[in-house]
Amino acid sequence: MDAGTGIFIRDLIRPANAQIMNALVDSIGEEYDEYQKKLFRDSLHAALTLDEVNQLISLSGLQQVKVYQSCDRHWTAERSTERAKLICKFLI
């Protein structure tokens, strides 16, 4: 991948403990049945931690990628470029 290529990846983050996982599952709303809540819990359990994402980015050799927790349930990996910034500006 060209060093000037923008990157934007977002996915679920694995909660640090069962208490946080339970709170996230409980927060999705009453409109979800128990099976849907189980699927969400399973997805959270299978998700990567920030440390794991950082390790994968490092192993991949990608440079200047910012990895951070972007909300209570997601991590984001991004590398902005001037071209990507111009495209975003045009779309807004």
Image (cartoon, rainbow, N blue to C red):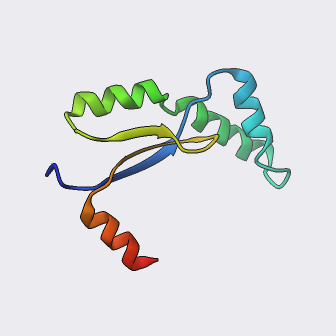
Is 82 drawn above or below residue 49 in the view shown? below
Spot occupied by residue 12 in the image (x, y as percentages of width and height) = 54, 41
Spot occupied by residue 39 in the image (x, y as percentages of width and height) = 65, 41
Query: In the figure, is residue 50 to the left or right of 83?
Result: right
Task: Choose top left, top right, bottom left or bottom right for residue 4.
Answer: bottom left
Using the image as rendered, state which of residue 27 and residue 76 is in the foreground.
Answer: 76
Spot occupied by residue 41 in the image (x, y as percentages of width and height) = 66, 35
Is 43 drawn above or below residue 28 in the view shown? above
Residue extending furthest toward the left: 2
Query: Which residue lies at the image location 19% right of the left edge and 33% below the top edge?
Result: 61
Query: In the figure, is residue 91 to the left or right of 42?
Result: left
Looking at the image, how many numbered discs can be counted on the residues? Answer: 0
Residue extending furthest toward the right: 30
Query: Which residue lies at the image location 65% right of the left edge and 41% below the top edge?
Result: 40
Using the image as rendered, state which of residue 14 and residue 67 is in the foreground.
Answer: 67
Spot occupied by residue 1 in the image (x, y as percentages of width and height) = 15, 49
Is 47 drawn above or below residue 37 in the view shown? above
Residue extending furthest toward the top: 17
Query: In the figure, is residue 13 to the left or right of 7?
Result: right
Using the image as rendered, state which of residue 34 and residue 18 is in the foreground.
Answer: 18
Query: Which residue lies at the image location 78% right of the left edge and 43% below the top edge?
Result: 27
Query: Which residue lies at the image location 22% right of the left edge and 34% below the top edge?
Result: 60
